[in-house]
Image: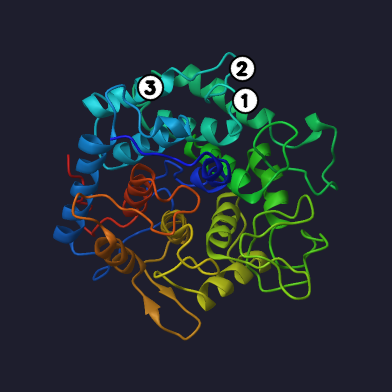
Amino acid sequence: MKVRVNPFAKLLGFLWVFSVLALGGVTLAQDGHSNSPGTGPDPQIYQACVKKGIDFLINRGQLPDGSFSPEAGVGITGIAVFALLQHGLPVDHPAIRSGLGYIERYIQPDGGIYSPDSFYKNYETCIAIMCLQAANKDGRYQDVIARAERFAKDIQWDESEDISPSDYAYGGAGYGRHRRPDLSNTAFLIDALKSLGRGPDDPAIQKALIFVSRCQNLETEHNTTPFANKNPDGGFYYTWAAGGESMAGKTPTGGLRSYGSMTYAGLKSMIYAGVKADDPRVQAAKRWIAEHYDLESNPGLGQQGLYYYYHTFAKTMSALGEPYFVDASGKRHDWRAELVAALVKRQREDGSWINMADRWMEGDPNLVTAYALLALAYCRPENGSGTSQ
């Protein structure tokens, strides 16, 4: 199955496509989530949904060379293979073996793992790190991963770029060296490092935290950017750089509107960087989420980027470590059961998912099905079942 991708949509789309994931490669237990009696989805419904999604990717999405949507580069292949690994497919499964082989073709001499002349070197390399780490039980990818980690850290904006922590670009990651930093790329870098077992004591994660804090609509000692107090609602936006940008637009006063995907990504990144629950940054982000809790839309963007949002929602809720989330009205949400229900009703007969609001490549069923499966990996039933293969 070959999916056509509009080249312009491809260019815009990767700022979403690869902030996905994991995409992190972190299990629910590692994120601190523990199931409580009476929470989570129905096991049979969950298992059927996951199985259909896996069957679609293996039987209809993957091409003979092991790739998924190769016209979009190596990234979607990495996302899809990672999703399959997260649901228990072994490394020697034919779909995994051929997918990993395809990714290996893009290992570059500088240590990065990306398509030739790629504009998305940070994204593609970090996706590959997480995917290969998930397949690295026997250490086969140890050297490749180590070199890829060095590459990803090398393109982070820090002293190597002759900038200091006082520079607003400090700690951020962008599309490559000398590309403007943004929260999407930076969150993705943190996810990749966490998948390798790096914690808050890792210097690159602490540098990234400085940038993440500056993308929050909250003025604190950690954020004195010009946008910090123009829309102080505690949510997050894409980047302050190059005049500031939010995919949700600007407020009448010139502030950058917060929106769901980046707010969850920002909160998750802070948790991974060791920011405590009582920190004002975490508290403000949680208040924003409580006021905008939604599984019918990506808050602030409607249906745009919905499946990217679903994945980031699941990963962040898991990182918070609670089986329930209480919204601003006081309603308690069994977020795993609710997210599974939202995905089940949107799954197509062939097992795939697709977003008719085709922005950021979410018209590609390979990408969107991988997003959905990654989200489902954080929603396993209480008995831990759900692996379909």
Q: Are marks 3 and 1 in contact (CB under 8 Å)?
A: no
Q: Which residue is mark 2?
A: 110
Question: In x, y percent, where is residue 38?
Answer: 24, 71
Q: For the N terminus, which image quadrant?
A: top left
The tag on residue 102 is 3
Front-lying residue, 66 or 44 = 66
| Kind of residue at badge 1 | Phe
The tag on residue 151 is 1
Q: Residues within 10 Å of mark 1 (few under 14, many from 20)?
A: some
Dot 3 or dot 1: first in sequence order is 3
Q: Could you tell me which residue is drawn at 22 percent across and 25 percent down?
A: 94
Q: Could you tell me which residue is drawn at 42 percent across and 51 percent down?
A: 362
Q: Could you tell me which residue is drawn at 55 percent across and 21 percent down?
A: 116
Q: Residues within 10 Å of mark 3 (few under 14, many from 20)?
A: some
Q: Are marks 2 and 1 in contact (CB under 8 Å)?
A: yes
Secondary structure beneath dot 2 equals loop
| Kind of residue at badge 3 | Tyr
